[in-house]
Image: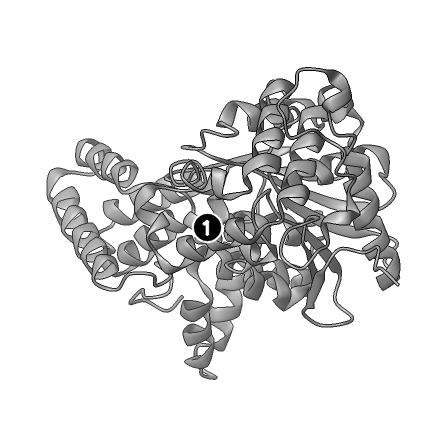
Amino acid sequence: MTDTRPHHDLTGPATAPPLILGPSIGTSLAVWEPQLPALAREHRVLRWDLPGHGGSPATLLPSDGSANGSADSSADGSATIDALAALVLRLADDQGWERFAYAGISIGGAVGLYLAAHHPDRVSRLSVICSSARFGDPAVWRERAALVRAEGTEAMVASRPGTWFSHRFAQSPVGAALIEDLRATDRAGYAACCDVLAAYDMTADLAKITAPTLVVAGRDDPATPPAHARRIADAVPGASLVEVAGAAHLAGVERPEAVTAALLAHLTSTAPPQPGDDASRHAAGMAVRRAVLGDAHVDRAVARTTPFTARFQDFITRYAWGEIWTGDGLDRRTRSCITLTALIAHGHDAELAMHIRAALTNGLTREEIGEVLLQSAIYCGVPAANSAFATAQRVFDEIDATPHVDSASHSRTEK
């Protein structure tokens, strides 16, 4: 009997809150691997493959489009976004999940928007990454569908570096593996997903979404530029927007720390803790502390805690991270700028090194950090800024000497 469910993978504690992750067109569930360890620590994570992608059969969507590029509407495939959403609901039902958090990239994000608007009782939180309410001219997607039906997904390979991520990143093992995923994708399944995007338009439905929503944009994304994300964030009531510097369409792959931090903050955010609710404050603070400073740093700090320092560690987690850094009044990029300036003013170079790494995690570029340091020369003094530039250069040199290492995990100060 043919399975009518997408290929999927489950990770994380069986009793943890459910989280479903949707991929982008041309990739498999492996596109979520950079975020998986952090997300699966506190969630039961289900990743799924699009039809014809990864391990999912192409037959999950109709493949009735034409391969001849005809402009006749009868040649257009009939696959639509509601069919993909139904596949996700089927997976959730199989797990017994009445409600779940959902995060999706590109077409995976489009599925999330549809679910949140048309099945609001099912989606508890929504994260939309490098996606859109409408992916441009439908004719472009019809043409791409016809091309891939005729020539296979190899026809798309040359254009993915520079679209998915930078050309340099395409040469990395991670980038190369994603390109191979594209090559392995079934042409009928890929083309059917193009048909979905051609017919998709959620513009009029965004205002219906009631789930707390995070929208993430890659600042260098040519496929869904930041303007697409801003339109979603402006239309969805109460939505938050994060723009990731130095990232193209697969922002979570090229800039994993920044995207992971944004997701963790959104997924773990709750109503402000009530006075005296120290347990809630500590839990929220630890989640944000890990997101900003990195697991390795926090694990070292916890491991070095002694009876003498335990109260201080608890105080920092509850107050600095659990109240200040979790606040909704400022985004984390702004908080990093403020923190850097304050540390420069007081000459706390060891703390400054830690928070320079944290600023990179929070989405600041090296150039933007340099602007903060230059501004501090005016208001904190040239000698303080001179020392800060030396500290920042040392941090950047250390990062460059250890490529592919989490930049937030090698600070010298454990706090």
Instruction: Estimate how packed mark 1 is, as few (under 14), some (14 to 19) or many (20 or more) residues with alpha carbons within 10 Å.
Output: many
Q: Quadrant of residue 279?
A: bottom right
Instruction: Classify residue 89 as left or right of residue 247.
Output: right
Residue 316 x/y as whole percent: 48, 62
Frontmost residue, 197 versus 128: 197
Q: Check disc 1 and report its element: helix, strand or loop.
A: helix
Residue 287 x/y as whole percent: 57, 60
Q: Which residue is mark 1?
A: 179
Frontmost residue, 296 versus 203: 203
Residue 68 x/y as whole percent: 63, 26
The structure residue drawn at horizontal position 78% and vertical position 70%, both measured from the top left corner, is: 15
Q: Is residue 318 visible?
A: no
Q: Quadrant of residue 7?
A: bottom right
Residue 271 position (above or below residue 397): above
The structure residue drawn at horizontal position 64% and vertical position 25%, both measured from the top left corner, is: 142
Q: Is residue 169 visible?
A: yes
Residue 232 position (above or below residue 17): above
The N terminus lies in which quarter of the figure?
Answer: bottom right
Frontmost residue, 109 versus 233: 109
Which amino acid type is shown beneath numbered disc 1? Ile
Residue 262 x/y as whole percent: 54, 47
The structure residue drawn at horizontal position 71% and vertical position 20%, both measured from the top left corner, is: 203
